[in-house]
Amino acid sequence: MTEYSTIYRIVGVVLTAAAIQASSNDCPVLECWFVQEKPGRGGFSPAVTQEKSLMYISTEPTDSASTQFRPPADIDLSRVYYVTDPSASFCHAPLHPPEGAVTKPQCEINPFLPQPSMVRWAASLTESGQSPVHLQADWLSVAAQGLDGQLVLSSLMRAPSGSKEPQVVLSVTSKTASVRARLGERVTLDCGFWVDPSSPLSGAGFSVEWRYQFRGEGRLVLAYDGKRDWLAETSETGATVDFAALHESGDASLVLEEAETRHSGTYICTVYLPNLLAQVALDLEVVEPPSLSIYPSPLPLVVPGQAVTVQCEASGFVPLSLELAWEFVGADGKPRALGQGSVSGHRQALDGTYSQSSRLELDSAKLGLGRGGEVSCVAVHKGGTRKAKVALNVIGVSAPSIEDSMAMVAVALGLYGLIKVFSWTFSSPGTGQDDAKDKKEK
């Protein structure tokens, strides 16, 4: 029994080592731009410099002197970094494009200066006022976005002064860089963070903040001090975080109970550690296709040369962009475009959704609509294409159908009835006067 257990332990160690090695090998070599500001002169804004850089990433510490990597000639050796990422945040597939791919992940490196945060929900993290010795190092901030917006990542890395071998201390990631939702849906905006357990900052507390921005305006959605277990008061309703998951696994995802039009915009998830912060931005778009109605419905019977006006009403849609058009399908089954008609301006409802209408004059003679068919209003919107239909019947044309004949008989009977009514009405008074004359003569 002991012998077998020893073998199992050996096999387990080998498999674990192989898995770690495979994980390390799967980590990408990220091409980044190193961006920093140069001191400005006078009142001018500081100039920005950009340099090509590379990050060779491994889940275990790597000695740069022992590596076989040879950077391209157009990259300065001072901008080559050998990054240790125990969390494997940089090793996700969206940051590792296929070999030879034209499209590559976006990546930017900036120098970072640790400093206390001024927001109330992060003040408790630096209330001692002391600057830890651990902060005396070279700090870098990395922002990366994976292919097709599948991942956004923000990391803070610490390297001994003068070293090009930084280690990831804090990573904030999101798998929902771009989210689309229907009105009334429950929406989850993904955000998670990881702190290096070997760092002195691990266990020193954290804070999480969610902010909303749209067209230059913003508001605080949620703010939580994880050290004091304190939730800041905000005017936002229907937005929550799973606080148990936040403490247990770093899941800081924001949940919106019901998507409304006012929720469309950019959401920023920021995680604070003592003297450090990292953040990712996510875009949420609330999309609702229009509801279509055609008036009048059904359409009245039309004779050649007679025009009838039809209106299509599109309502309850968001965002604003909408294309309205008309189509006609005759007996041959082939669709014909009738144009946009006369389109009105947009009207906004109290819930933030929009409505718009289109009017079209149908003249069977001018448009060549034959014996009629089906008229459709088509709305093309980001939320999908919608179509409403109504039947158009044209009577009095050559070779009438059975339905047209029956309609003509019905019209004739109606006219005959009206003539009889008028005839009785105008003939009745005369008859009464003749009867009175006959009585006098007698």
Image (cartoon, rainbow, N blue to C red):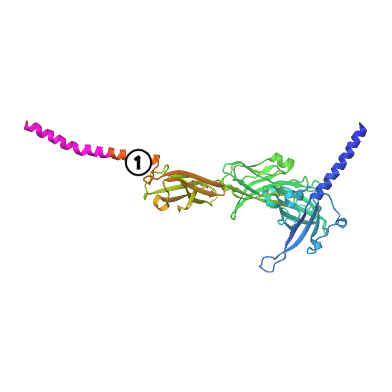
> Can you identify the residue that label 1 sits on?
408
Is the magenta region chiefly helix, strand or loop? helix
- In the rendered image, residue 160, in percent from the top left (x then y), is placed at 83, 56
Q: Quadrant of residue 102?
A: bottom right
> Magenta span has 421?
yes
- In the rendered image, residue 436, in percent from the top left (x then y), is placed at 11, 33
- Report whether 20 appears left or right of 109: right
Q: Residue 351: in sight, yes or no?
A: no
In the image, what residue occupies the spot 29% across and 40% down?
Answer: 415
Looking at the rendered structure, the kind of residue marked 1 is Met
The stretch in magenta equals 418-441
Q: Residue 185: in sight, yes or no?
A: yes
Q: Looking at this view, is 409 or 42 the one in front?
A: 409
Looking at the rendered image, the quarter that the N terminus falls into is top right
- In the rendered image, residue 294, in percent from the top left (x then y), is placed at 45, 45
Element type at mark 1: helix
- Report whether 115 appears left or right of 16: left
- In the rendered image, residue 12, in percent from the top left (x then y), is placed at 86, 39
Instruction: Note whether 90 is above or below 45 in the view shown.
Output: above
